[in-house]
Amino acid sequence: MGLKCGILGLPNIGKSTIFNVLTKSKAMAANFPFCTIKPNIGFSLLPDNRLIEIQKIVNSKKITPTNIKFIDIAGLVKGASSGNGLGNKFLNDVRSVNILIHVVRFFKDQNIQHIYNRIDPIKDINIINDELIISDIELCEKNILYLNKKNKNYKNNKYLLETCLYNLENGLMLNNIIFKKEETKYINSINFLTSKPMMYVINSDKNFFKNDKIFKKLKKKFIKKKNIFINICAKTELEISEINNYEKKKKKLFELKLKESKLNKLITYSFKLLNMHTYFTVGKKEICSRPILIGTNALESSKKIHTDFKKGFIRAKVISYKDFIKYNGENGVKKMGKIKLEGKKYVIKDGDIIQYFFKI
Ligand SMILES: Nc1nc2c(ncn2[C@@H]2O[C@H](COP(=O)(O)OP(=O)(O)O)[C@@H](O)[C@H]2O)c(=O)[nH]1
Ligand SMILES: [Mg+2]
């Protein structure tokens, strides 16, 4: 699984503004629909204070945080699945990502045109999700046809696709359905749009949420379906990001009753949605944050550093982050007898500090 997050939604709702702040890019963000045609690509660093705490002990030359790729996809509109707006090509851009960040407009601004001339986040969400569903129905039917031509061995997969089709035709996204592990594997291999994990980002005015009726309704809808959602104000985030002076930035955040930019939360949630966590490799030259899928074992994760590590794997020396900080680095942990030597099958925990031993 990669670390590719796609930002999608209707046109002119603040996607490119959010993308620019997230990735410190300068993609065109302007008040006209379809301002973004080619997808913009950028990277964000995963915020992780643990790197700084480790650095205080080790004093390394370099810190390398985890990078997450964000793709600012052109606005989708009603009928995109049959070619409207910028059409199918953009659904293909959606297909190329691992998770979906669905931005919804909830700010009032007469100067910024809404493509349907209204502020109704629930209707907007349904427009986008319906397009994804229609595209998945087509893909599902295509795959059922393909399996029909094959022999009987594919009966289970066909049954599974028929279940998917039934749910899609009833307006359900596949990410709202619980599948068995084997089924999930097959569903993922087809690369449906609605089976991708999705987070909703409500782009709201600072004075226009919490007590608002529509917002309450929206929140209820999200909570009922256990969807991750976050509300931010893209315009404010942009303003915060443009303040270079540390004290001035602190003051602005204080005025807004924020501890930090809400986009940090967005990045952290995205990473969680990818079902990933991080472990660290720590040395005098570099402290490195390493993203892996939750449940990955030591052998598999070692391969990500170097294929030789997997080929000649002997064992992994593991220190928990908590012990590393508590006992002030490796020597202290060693004295307390808290260093663990683990084999290939050891399942890596979040925050583990790992050194691999291998022979070539
Ligand atoms: N008032 C207000 N305007 C915003 C906000 N976010 C974005 N905009 C404006 O809306 C317009 C469209 O933004 P853009 O990021 O290009 O939208 P996109 O088409 O979804 O990528 C720009 O003029 C932005 O400055 C917001 O939170 N409040
Ligand atoms: Mg845009």
Image (spheres, helix red, strand yellow):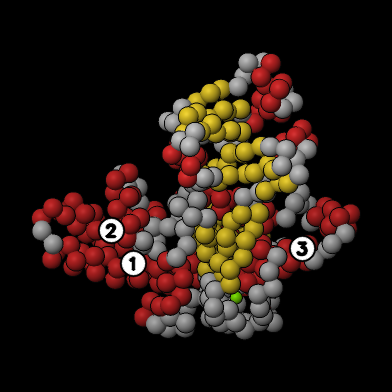
Q: Is residue 121 left or right of residue 47?
A: left
Query: Are the residues flagged by discs 1 and 2 in contact, CB closer than 8 Å?
Result: yes
Q: Which mark is residue 239?
A: none
Q: Residue at x 61, y 65 (%)?
A: 42
Ligand 1 shown in quarter: bottom right
Residue type at the position of mark 3: Ser
Q: Position of residue 2 (x, y in %)?
A: 49, 55
Above or below 220: residue 303: above
Mark 1 C-beta to ligand 1 under 8 Å:
no
Q: Residue drawn at (73%, 63%), measured in percent from left and top?
A: 237
Which residue is found at the position 46% from the left and 35% from the top? 312
Residue 106 place in picture, x, y as percent: 61, 68
Dot 3: element:
helix
Q: Residue furthest top?
A: 336
Q: Dot 2: few (<14), some (14–19), or many (≥20) neighbours within 10 Å?
A: many
Mark 3, ligand 1, within 8 Å: the answer is: no
Q: CA distance from mark 1 to mark 3?
A: 38 Å
Look at mark 1 in the image and give the residue it sits on: 136
Q: Quadrant of residue 21?
A: bottom right
Looking at the image, tell me whether mark 1 or mark 3 is earlier in sequence order.
1
The spot of residue 310 in percent (x, y) is 45, 39
Rendered image: mark on residue 241: 3
Q: Quadrant of residue 41?
A: bottom right
- For marks 3 and 2, give the one nearer the viewer: 3
The circle drawn on residue 164 is 2
Measured in 3D between alpha carbons, the distance from the residue under mark 1 to the one under mark 2, in whole angstroms, is 9 Å
Q: Residue at x 32, y 50 (%)?
A: 185
Neighbour class for label 3 at 10 Å: few (<14), some, many (≥20)? some
Give above or below for 133 relative to 320.
below
What amino acid type should be assigned to the residue bearing mark 1? Asp
Q: Amino acid at mark 2?
A: Cys
